[in-house]
Amino acid sequence: MIRSARFTRRGRILLAVVIGLLLASPMLYMVSGSLMSNSQLSVQPPQVLPSSLHFGNYAAAFSGMTQVIQLRSFLNSVIFTVGVVGLQWLLCISGGLVVAKMQFRARKVIIAMFGVSLFIPILTTLIPTFIVTYELKMVNTYPGLILPIAAQTAFGTLLFRQYISQLPEELFDAARIDGATWWTIFRRLVVPLSKPATAAYVAISVLTAWNMYLWPLVAAEGGSLQVLTQTLALVGTTSQGEVTPQNVIFASVVIVTLPMILVFIAVQKAFMRGLSGSGVE
Amino acid sequence: MKTETDGHETAGSPGEPAAAVPNRGSSRPNKLGAGKTSAVPSTDIDRRRARKPSPRSGSDRLAGLTLLGPNLTLFSVFVLVPIVGGLLLSFTTWDITNGLPKWVGLANYRRMFADPLVWQAVLTTLKFIVFGVVPTVFIALGLAMLINVRFRFVGAVRSLYLIPAAMSFAASAVVWRYIFLDGPGFGVLDYVISRFGITPPDWLASQTWALPALDIITVWLSLPAATVLYLAALQRIPDSLIEAAALDGAGPFRRARYIIWPGVRYMTVLVAIVALLSFTNGSFDLVNILTKGDPLYATQTLIYYIFVTGFGYGFFGYAAALSVLQVALIGGILLVLWALSKLTQR
């Protein structure tokens, strides 16, 4: 009995590792391929490991005839992500405080409004959102790229409301008795105490913003505001993809994904907590 | 900050002598100096402008407005106005570069019902979602059960399961395009399949297999979030319950059916909703990058059709009407999910 239990435990762990490798294999293939020579990458049967490391593929992704990644797009992605996440965080945590701790008549209406809008993703209101942005003369500008996405505050506001309403009431009462204004409470109490919620929120929204494709595609048709997902989309379509060598394309995908992998490793716990609303051990 | 916080806690606790408050109060700068009356009787009112926590005072209202106002303003302009505006727009025709929208009543909706491409797109979207979300739910539960075990490197192994979440649809599209590449001696997947003696299909170029191929990519991208959600639910099921069942002779499948499935059922709705949103995204990103709705409209999802109608042909009014249909479609799916969760609760 005990021996069979130990065997099934080992077998289970082995199975977990094998399936994990299988699930990660498209990414492992991408990383491995990005370091191969192009002839090794297209040989049959497919090779698992590069015979020698071609780091030149990464340089080729940035320059010359094979250039895929423009520094400008990289910068645009950073500006877009930092802008969206920073602004949205500020809007959500301050708004979350108000709907969590202040009593006023419209409170329930506002909470319900945020809740309902969660189920109408921006994708489905793409046309009117674009028209609003167009009428505000914001198409092909950074504000037009950032504001409509930063304005999707429903999820974040509800997340912070949930978290802040769990903070002990006495804390707030005491601060008020001490004469603290709501602004002071916000800055010195809510922001520092909400660090766990902030970490979870930032983890999810950084990934979402960096990986967003559709909105930048319509809000920044011109080349100068292009973000990295658009760059990749170009090599993903057949016509463009056949000009650039496959190993350079793979290196480009790694370059674009690497910041998110680093973010992901740094905040894996927060990411899991943010998704599940509780501690996953 | 830590000690300050502790200070607040003691000050606020009931039964605390009022005399304990002034020292702390006086050391705190009062930014607005807004307090009119002191909450604590004292002889030193000027130095301790403590306020009663009355939510209706003017400065509170101002603070509430400044804290929530920017959020509500942006939300109104870029979320509420588009929702209401989109509805109105669907009763008009509008070439936005030229003049004002023209009211046409129900014409767009009549056109929608007569447009065979619309119904094909709806069907394609439903197929894409059903054949993607259902496998995601079951596979994610299986994966979560598999990694819900403790061993030394469990963190590293779990990372393998979660890391695809770092990839965008665009990045995945590029890599999977090479995995799916057709023709003898090209794509990795075709190589593996032909090793088993099966003739691989023409993935993205095939009318039958293009949509399933996009489903495979989206399932792959949706699994990490779904697995984490299930893992959280699984960890709330006491181990003793599962062990007891095992001792009673219940095998892994019976345990899954009678203990684990009921234990994580509440999470299934959330997993399905999160997956649904992911598939809604995928139904545009992947289609636009990999297939453009081809071959022969086999992968033209409703969102892609809306995009083409609006930004390709410039029929913004008609595209707005199609967007209303898209919202109704998602709403309908959510309703079905809700009904299913109610039905299976017994």
Image: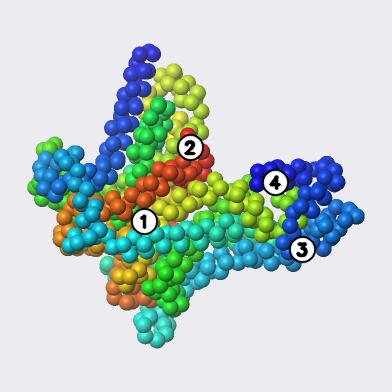
Give the amino acid at mark 3.
Answer: Gly
- Give the alpha-carbon distance from disc 3 to disc 4, as whole Å: 20 Å
- Give the alpha-carbon distance from disc 2 to disc 1, as whole Å: 25 Å
- Give the alpha-carbon distance from disc 1 to disc 4, as whole Å: 40 Å
Whether labels 3 and 4 belong to a single chain: the reply is yes
Give the residue drawn at x 19%, y 39%. A49
The 10 Å Cα crowd at callout 1, few under 14, some 14 to 19, many 20 or more, is many
Q: Position of residue B331 (x, y in %)?
A: 44, 58
Could you tell me which chain the residue with mark 4 belongs to? Answer: B
- Give the alpha-carbon distance from disc 3 to disc 1, as whole Å: 46 Å
- The residue tagged 4 is B4
Give the amino acid at mark 1.
Answer: Asn
The 10 Å Cα crowd at callout 4, few under 14, some 14 to 19, many 20 or more, is few
Q: Nearer the viewer, residue A201 or B148?
A: A201
- The residue tagged 3 is B33
2 and 4 marks in contact (CB < 8 Å):
no
